[in-house]
């Protein structure tokens, strides 16, 4: 049984559960009641992908290989972002710092000169309010193009896992996993990626709410041995210490959107 009391299909792990919509319908249309909703609608969006590379020499992995074993081959190499749930400010957390400038429009600022931010799709103050004179394109019932430049500063660590096939003196094979935390960049010397974009802005004249500009990015990482040859890229010490030469790719997907907010029922 799942954590909601629903039966889990046999091909799922026992510690997984099915979502519960908490919605029931009797089948009688007269039982339906509408209610007002505060919703947001995407007016325009752009999607782009960026990639940064990191080479690592002689990266130490733990634990050491057991005595009397040798590496027969590498089975798999995996990479994931480092994240410390007990401290979101941990400098080892893989972090993206976005800096976006706009040409053709202006971010609204308060009296202290700080940009006005409102709650975005991530539940934090991540949406900025934009203003531009859109009257020329409004007369044509069209949006106004604006242009932007974005730089992304990548800092923090990733975790690398290598599955090794070991063999002892009696030719018995065993799968042995080693791991390491690898630093991609520090706050003082971040990995910087830059891109340019064009997006269509809705009217700022014929609207009750000025358009919101929001952006969010997601990261993934891939890694491999530097030359794809474990004989060259893996070094085994006398006591089983293991180090590796790696190439790590940080893949970033970003979405930038203009959001319109309104109520409906």
Image (cartoon, rainbow, N blue to C red):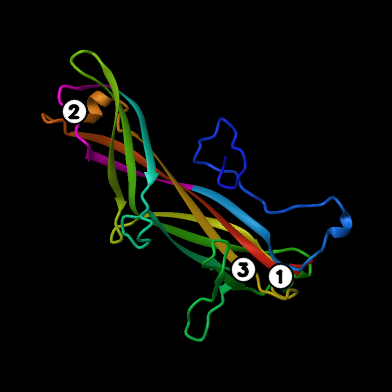
Disc 2 is placed on an element classified as loop
For label 2, count other residues whose C-alpha is less than 10 Å away and answer few (under 14), some (14-19) or many (20+).
few
Mark 2 or 3: in front is 2
Q: Position of residue 200 (x, y in %)?
A: 66, 61
Q: Find the distance from the CA under tag 1 to the CA under tag 2.
A: 67 Å
Q: Position of residue 41 (x, y in %)?
A: 69, 61
For label 1, count other residues whose C-alpha is less than 10 Å away and answer few (under 14), some (14-19) or many (20+).
many
Residue 66's disc number: 2
In the image, 256: left or right of 82?
right
Q: Position of residue 184 (x, y in %)?
A: 32, 49
Return the disc, 1 or 3, that comes first in the chain's sequence: 1
Residue furthest left as drawn: 238
Q: Find the distance from the CA under tag 2 to the CA under tag 3.
A: 57 Å
Q: Are marks 1 and 3 in contact (CB under 8 Å)?
A: no
Mark 1 or 2: in front is 2
Q: Find the distance from the CA under tag 1 to the CA under tag 3.
A: 11 Å
Magenta stretch, residue numbers:
50-72
Residue occupying the point 72% across, 53% down:
23
Q: Are marks 2 and 3 in contact (CB under 8 Å)?
A: no
Residue 203's disc number: 1
Where is mark 3, residue-wise?
212
For label 3, count other residues whose C-alpha is less than 10 Å away and answer few (under 14), some (14-19) or many (20+).
many
In the image, 136: left or right of 29?
left
Residue 62 part of the magenta segment: yes
Q: Is residue 133 above or below residue 141?
A: below
């Amino acid at each position: 049984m799942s954590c909601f009391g629903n039966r889990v299909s046999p091909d799922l792990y026992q510690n997984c559960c099915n979502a519960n919509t908490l919605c029931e319908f009797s089948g009688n249309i007269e039982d339906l009641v509408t209610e007002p909703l505060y919703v947001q609608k995407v007016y325009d969006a752009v999607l782009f992908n960026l990639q940064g590379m990191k080479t690592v020499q002689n990266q130490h992995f733990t634990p050491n290989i057991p005595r009397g074993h040798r590496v027969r081959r590498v089975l798999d190499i995996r990479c994931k972002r480092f994240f410390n749930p007990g401290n979101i400010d941990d400098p080892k957390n893989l972090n993206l710092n976005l800096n976006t400038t706009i040409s053709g429009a202006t971010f609204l600022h308060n009296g202290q000169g700080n940009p006005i931010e409102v709650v975005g799709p991530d539940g934090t103050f991540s949406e900025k309010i934009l203003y531009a004179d859109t009257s020329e394109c409004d007369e044509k019932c069209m949006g106004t193009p604006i242009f932007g430049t974005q730089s992304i500063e990548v800092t923090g660590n990733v975790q690398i896992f290598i599955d090794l096939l070991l063999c002892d003196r009696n030719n018995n094979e065993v799968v042995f996993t080693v791991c390491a935390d690898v630093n991609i960049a520090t706050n003082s010397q971040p990995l910087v990626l830059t891109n340019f974009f064009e997006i269509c802005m809705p009217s700022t004249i014929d609207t009750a709410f000025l358009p919101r500009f929001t952006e969010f990015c997601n990261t993934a990482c891939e890694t491999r041995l530097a030359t794809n040859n474990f004989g060259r890229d893996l070094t085994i010490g006398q006591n089983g210490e293991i180090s590796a030469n790696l190439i790590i790719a940080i893949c970033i997907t970003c979405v930038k959107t203009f959001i319109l907010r309104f109520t409906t029922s």
